[in-house]
Image (tube, rainbow, N blue to C red):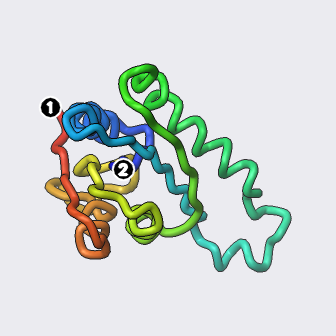
Amino acid sequence: MIVVPIDGSNHSLNALEYAVKAAESFREKILLVNVQQVKDRNFYIDSPKMKPSDKVLEKEGETALQKAVDFLESKVEYDTKIRIGVPSIEIANEARDQNASAIIMGSRGNGPVVSQILGSVSYGVLHLSSCPVTIVPGRE
């Protein structure tokens, strides 16, 4: 199984195109993973009415995954997963849970730009993953 993190960004969709080629070559299934991160969790602890519900986060995840699902229709076998937490940790944990053969991801996503070369999530996954990680650069 090849894990492909999807956040709806063009970088993640470009990585998906690359992952499809790898999945076809190696006869692998693709797992599209979206991670919803609740920002400022400490703020929400005292404000339960303002804390986004899991259903709201799941809906945001489904929206981010939709373009990827549309692209994959009938190309390769795939599944989807939405996780809530810190993206780099959740992606690495999902790959480990699935005994993935690889993670293929974009160099940057929709988050705040930490680096013009490598995003913070990509950097974190590289250091946390127990399987090979391929970082696919975006198209200019």
The image shows residue 43, relative to residue 79, as above or below, that is below
Q: Element type at marker 1?
A: loop
Q: Is the residue 53 above or below the residue 21 in the image?
A: below
* Mark 2 neighbour density, 10 Å: few (under 14) some (14–19) many (20 or more): many
Label 1 crowd bin: few (<14), some (14–19), many (20+), radius 10 Å: few
Lower sequence index among marks 2 and 1: 2
Please identify, in this view, whether the residue under mark 2 or under mark 1 is nearer the observer. 2
Snapshot quadrant of residue 124: bottom left
In terms of depth relative to the viewer, which is nearer, 77 or 44? 77
At 57% across and 58% down in the image, what residue appears?
83
Residue 128 placement: quadrant: bottom left
Estimate the spatial distance between the alpha carbons at disc 2 and disc 1, rounded to whole Å. 29 Å
- Does residue 112 appear to the left or right of 115 in the view shown? right
In which quadrant will I find the C terminus? top left
Residue 76: x %, y % from top left? 37, 29
Residue 64's label in the rendered image is none
Residue at 80 percent of width and 72 percent of height:
47
The image position of residue 81, as x and y in percent, is 55, 49
Q: Amino acid at mark 1?
A: Glu
Q: Residue furthest right?
A: 49
